Structures are given as structure tokens and as C-alpha cells.
Image: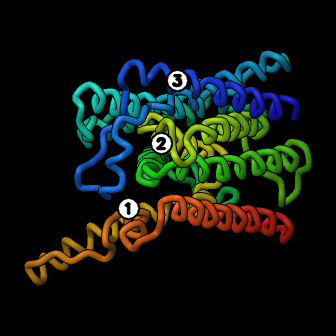
Amino acid sequence: MRAILLGGGLALLFSLLGTRVAIRAFTNLGYGQEIRDDGPTSHHTKRGTPTMGGVVIIAATVFGYFLAKLITLDTPSASALLLLFLFAGCGIVGFLDDFIKIVKQRSLGLRSKAKMIGLTVVALTFGIVSLLPALEDGRELTPASRHLSFIRDFEAFTLPAVVVVLLIWLIVAGTSNAVNLTDGYDGLATGASVMVFGAYMLVNIWQNNQSCSLTGGRTCYEVRDPLDLAVIAAAITGACFGFLWWNASPAQIFMGDTGSLSLGGALAGFAILTRTELLMAILGGLFVAVTLSVMLQVSWFKATRRLTGTGKRLFRMAPLQHHFELLGWAEITIVIRFWIITGLCVAAGLGIFYAEWVAGY
């Protein structure tokens, strides 16, 4: 428990102070955000705001975690190292995307195929290594599971390793892009991430306290290294909290794809390593809704164009937050209401998680 408090506190302090340094450095280097011309016109005033702030979130998380482990004289676990690899790996893909935007002075960075290739390499590496028998603990648990899961594994059938790796790739790619689509409004993705990763910290702590290695019985959790995962969850929560001080409206810095892809990758990693893939869709309900709005918009437009010759839109603009802005909602109103939605999703997810344990299924 001491490592959790240290990891979260140190990451928050590093992020709070480090982001101020990053704002000054990125401003001097001219690392300003480019804005899409086809987006809401109100966003054009944000052009030139320093971006790539996700670098600070990643650095603060890694710093907080490893310093906490050093202070407590504890050895990092395989699950934690894999999660940090996924977190930083997705962040590197996002960093390349942001850097190209800055160098080329355009709103488009990496091509979609190149970005997907980068995420695929990171996700497949994470998936393959997390299933290696060499990483089994004393209970023969690998970091990832070969079962589908909601709150715990469905053990009725075991999936082939190839299928599991493909599912891991799908989850990582989908979740990282979901957080990326949600980003774009001052503090929106950062504040939502604070709540979602804070929820995963609580899930990890509960899984550790009710681990099958300690309690046994039908309601125990077969998860490898839950307490160490809680340290990372606390560190990411603290890093996002510190970054939010500078990212809240009016934002002095944006996290960029560096931050959104890394946070999305970490969210996927927590879902996979804690055996809560389907529960993640509830905890991260805001990210799911934003992604669905884009999918529905594109699908409806293509379908109506095929049938009538003229494409029609379900929303005034996708992702979902742009639709509400074009309806006349102020940006800060959208952000706060979306934070409220995230809070409700987190409360629902944690309630379901605890109710399942109480019911003893």
C-alpha cells in the first residue's frame, strides 16, 4: 500500500512541476499544435498551443513507479513491466505522429497505415510476451489470460494463443484510438482518464486483497501481480491529475497523440492484465460512446449515399463532442458534462464489480 501512495504522489508532483517546464521548453522550440481546417472554427484560436504534453505524463508515471519500488525495496513484476512497455510503446507511436505534425506544419502526422503498423507491433509484442510460459508465477498464471473475461475469466473454454493475441491487438488498437478521438477539448481526456485509472487502482487493490493465493473460494481473483498494477494505476492517475492543472480550460499545453495513444494503450493493458476486458467498456463508457459516434456517422453516411446518392449524417459532426459544440454548447460545458458521464460510468462499473463479488458468482 505504501508503494501505491508513493507512486501516485511522486507522479503527481513530477507531472505538476514537469509540465510547467515542458510548456516553456516546447514554446521556445515552436512545438505548437496544428488545427484541422474542417474542425469547429472556434478551435482555430488554439493553433500554436504547445503540444506533446503526453511526454510528461509518461515520464511522470515511469518515474513515480520505479522510485516507489526503489523506496520500498520491491522488485518490479512481469505484469507491471509489460504494462509500462505497452504504455510507453503506444506513446512513442503518438510522439512520432505529433513530431511529424510539428515539423511539417500540418494537422496530419503519421499516415493511418503507418500509425496502425506501429500500434500493431507494440500490441502483438505485448500480447505474445504476456502469454509466455516463462512468465508464469507460482500459481502458473501468465500476465494475460487465454480466456475471455468480464469481471473474471469465463473458464468454460480456452482460446487458442493465436486468437488471444489477435484479440489483444484489437483491444489495444481500439482503446488507444478511442482515447485519441476523445481528446481535443481542454482537459476532457485528461479528466476522464483520472477517473478511469483511479477506478482501476481500486479494482487492483480489491483483487489483491481477495486474491486466490490469500483467500481461496469462489469469489477470489486469479490475477497475476494485482498490487503492482495498482502502483502503476496510481502513478498514471497522479500524472494525469498534475497535467490537468495546466491542461484545463484554457489549456496551456495539449497531451497530443503522445498522451492519448499511451493512455489508451494503458487502459487496454489494465483490462487485459486484470481479466476485466468487458468491464472496461463500462468504466470507459465515455470513450466507447465517442468511438461509436464516429463509426455510426461514417456507416450512416456511406449507407445513405449508396441508397440515395447523397450521404446524410446522424450527427452534425463527429466525434460526439463536436456535435454538441455545433448545437451551441460551450466547450467548458461539454467537458464538465462529459466528466459527469465518465463519473457515472465509473460508478456503475465499480458497482457491478463489487456486486458480483457480494453475490458470489
* Left-right relation of 56 to 316: right
Give, as a three-letter code, the residue at label 1: Pro
Residue 129's spot in the image, x, y percent? Answer: 53, 31
- Report the residue marked by disc 2: 260
* Left-right relation of 337 to 52: right
- Cα–Cα span, label 1 and label 3: 28 Å
Q: Mark 1 vs mark 3: which is more N-terminal? A: 3
Q: Mark 2 vs mark 3: which is more N-terminal? A: 3
Q: Residue furthest bottom?
A: 308
On the question of residue 157 being in view, the answer is no
Residue 37's spot in the image, x, y percent? Answer: 23, 50
| Residue at image location 61% in from the left, 50% down from the top | 191
- Cα–Cα span, label 1 and label 2: 15 Å
Q: Residues within 10 Å of mark 2 (few under 14, many from 20)?
A: many
Give, as a three-letter code, the residue at label 3: Ala
Q: Residues within 10 Å of mark 3 (few under 14, many from 20)?
A: some
Residue 81's spot in the image, x, y percent? Answer: 62, 27
User: Tag 3's secondary structure?
Assistant: helix
Residue 351 sits above or below residue 50 on the image:
below
Tell whether label 3 touches label 1 (CB within 8 Å): no
User: Tag 2's secondary structure?
Assistant: helix
In the figure, residue 308 lies in which quadrant? Answer: bottom left
Q: Residue furthest left?
A: 309
- Report the residue marked by disc 1: 319
- Report the residue marked by disc 3: 22
| Residue at image location 34% in from the left, 40% down from the top | 47
Give, as a three-letter code, the residue at label 2: Ser
User: Tag 1's secondary structure?
Assistant: loop
